[in-house]
Image: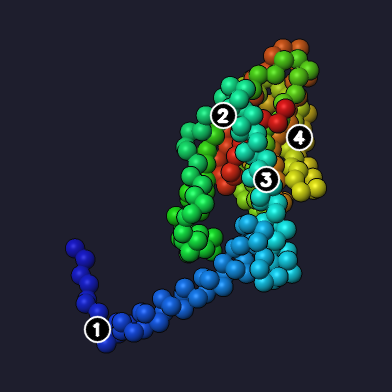
Amino acid sequence: MFNSQAPNPDDLPSSAQLVKSTILSVIAAGVLLVTVVMPSEYAIDPTGLGSAMGLTEMGEIKSQLAEEAEIDRQKNQSAGESLIAPQTAPATAPQEGSNLLERIIREFGISAAYAQDAMRQDEVSITLQPGEGAEIKLVMLKGAKANYSWTANGSKVNFDTHGDGGGESISYEKGRGAAEDSGVLEAAFDGNHGWFWRNRTGDAVTVTLKTDGAYSDIKRVM
């Protein structure tokens, strides 16, 4: 049993105070929309502050990545490919006419549920013939993290965990004759981050990759 004491009415905010707080919140949200969200998300910078803070370039990169992901998705659909079968469906992207104030609240962490909605989980298997290589990439924003684990299912492969995007590239880890690997992949910049495997054995090798974290898409590059 839990006992609780009713609050003193004098300690509760008045209606006027609540209205004032709401108006101030709306004004602050509008300022954030114009100076931060529009430049960083849509590359729209009416005040010029976004360019000064480097946010407009970020928005241009995000738009480019979204276009590339959509082109890849359409190519895969037209070719009848079905490489990925997500175990947990990713969050649905907001519609063009969605409430921008709600978007601002989500962007600045006011709603913890948004961070959970941004997470997704996938598993994919690729069979490599002797001498064959393959590459899987996650589309990630700078600082985003994804847990991963992959196994060669009893065999061994050479691998390179790396990233590229926006004219930048990075190699996180390389290995030869590895049977498996796991860890946390943190994106050093906006772009594609993932793994390349090559089978140097004399038999076919199946690599199984499991991922979960903050990424918007997973795709086979080669």
Disc 1 target residue: 8
Viewport quadrant of the N terminus: bottom left
Cβ atoms under marks 4 and 3 closer than 8 Å:
no
Q: CA distance from mark 1 to mark 3?
A: 53 Å
Residue occupying the point 24% across, 84% down: 9
Q: Which is nearer the N-term, disc 4 or disc 1?
A: 1
Q: Which mark is residue 65?
A: 3
N-terminal of the pair, mark 2 or mark 3, is: 3
Which residue reaches farthest bottom?
A: 10
> Which residue occupies the foreground of this view, 47 or 128?
47
Marks 4/2: CA–CA distance: 21 Å
Mark 1 or mark 2: which comes first in sequence?
1
Query: In the current view of this chain or complex, which residue is farthest to the top?
Result: 203
On screen, residue 77 above or below 41: above
Whole-number angstrom distance, CA of label 4 to CA of label 1: 63 Å
Question: Mark 4 belongs to which amino acid?
Answer: Asp
Q: Position of residue 128 (x, y in %)?
A: 70, 19
Q: Give the residue number, with chain letter if any, for mark 2.
A: 84
Where is mark 4, residue-wise? 160
Task: Please state which of the two labelled residues, at mark 2 or mark 3, is closer to the viewer.
Answer: 3
Q: In front of the other: label 4 or label 3?
A: 3
Can residue 136 be seen in this snapshot?
A: yes
Neighbourhood count class around disc 4 (C-alpha, 10 Å): few under 14, some 14–19, many 20 upward = some
